[in-house]
Amino acid sequence: MDVSVVIPFLNESPNLTPLCEELKASLDSMNKSYEVLFIDDGSTDDGVEVLEAFREKMPQIKVISFRRNFGQTAAMVAGLDYSQGEVVVTLDADRQNDPADIPALVAKVGEGYDMVCGWRFDRQDTFISRKLPSMMANRLISKITDVSLHDYGCTLKAMCKEVAKRITLYGEMHRFIPAVASGVGVKIAEVKVNHRARTAGESKYGISRTFRVILDLITVKFLLRFHARPLHFFGMPGLFLGGVGGALLTYLTIARLFFDVPLGDRPLLVFAFMLIVIGLQFILFGLIGEMQTRTYYESQDKPIYHVRRTVGIEEDSDNGIAADSKRSPTTKQKKPQPAGTKV
Ligand code: UDP
Ligand code: MG
């Protein structure tokens, strides 16, 4: 299989037939083998029936139907898990992304990029509720993460299979795919893509999404930098606060013992103790984090590194650690898990 197209949808029934028509035209023109994975994220309309009907014209369509709404991120992860193509393309089902852009993205991956992100340079959305928050989020995300792109919110992306199978997402982190992928180590390119106004169905998000994005950003940043060494994160303020507390206490002790200064009415004493206790707690958090990290990696035989290529080493040998770290739909099927899980 050359290309897998992953499309999460929630109540997009009126959009699906025209979308499939556009997909067919675009994908057939590439002369590659492909599959189109639709992930029904708990739709309550007849979307799945519409797709089943279209399968007669386009047998490459596959549908994964969730038991309930798990969110766009979970749907995306399911699509990545089930995909079999060498290149995985993701896009929205609401026809705002243009399937005609797919060949260009796939070609760019063929040039050696691990991930190619769409940039909606002429975005067709309302300004106040969409473009403005998105502009600010884009600035913030590119400042805070090490990946700088123009547009993080664009679902239209293409990535190679190795990356698709390795990135892990939770919450609403699909917009951090480039940042999360950068933790694996990826070569990222950006390609201008077409964006269209929504013509049918309703948008699924309100303005509250902005705040969730900011919270997710904190998680992503923390995990990218410290998740293999939490004690470095918690230990630093711990040592600092504990150190200041210790110094204050030493000073008070010397004042009491050698200069007969009474301590009963000195708030500094309470303050010093507080700093020591808080500092200790930070260090303990860090140590608990270190134990968690070990459980996380060792219980699942996860490597703490990702290999791009090897020379003189058999890829699928029995001790292939790298192969173990990849998710496969078979293990996924054996052990189905609820939300956008797997780490
Ligand atoms: N979507 C989904 N699950 C959800 C919310 C949205 O699968 O819980 C899908 C939706 O059907 C669409 C895509 O995610 O295909 C993007 O949603 P939407 O167009 O509402 O977001 P916007 O374009 O406004 O950012
Ligand atoms: Mg949309």
Image (cartoon, rainbow, N blue to C red):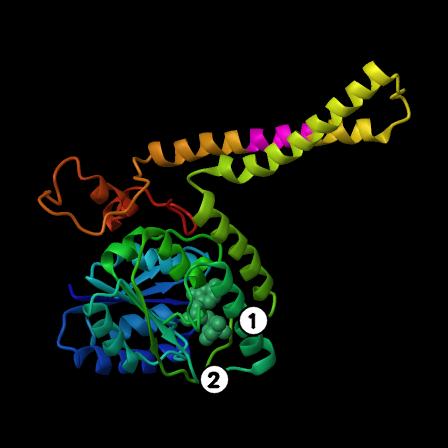
Q: Which of these two is toward me, 188 or 28?
A: 188
Q: Which residues are magenta?
A: 276-285
Q: Residues within 10 Å of mark 2 (few under 14, many from 20)?
A: some
Read off the residue under disc 1.
136
Q: Is residue 302 above or below residue 150?
A: above
Does 142 sit left or right of 38 as displayed?
Answer: right
In percent of width and height, residue 280 lies at 62, 28
Q: Quadrant of residue 23?
A: bottom left
Q: Quadrant of residue 175?
A: bottom left
Q: Residue 176 got which mark?
A: none
Q: Position of residue 147 (x, y in %)?
A: 41, 62
Q: Indicate the quadrant containing the N terminus: top left, top right, bottom left or bottom right.
A: bottom left
Regarding mark 2 in the picture, which secondary structure is present there? loop
Q: Nearer the viewer, residue 169 or 51?
A: 169
Amino acid tagged 1: Met
Q: Which residue is mark 2?
A: 124
The crowd level at tag 1 (other Cα within 10 Å; few <14, some 14-19, many 20+) is few
Magenta stretch, overall SS: helix
Image-based side of 143 in relation to 273, left or right: left
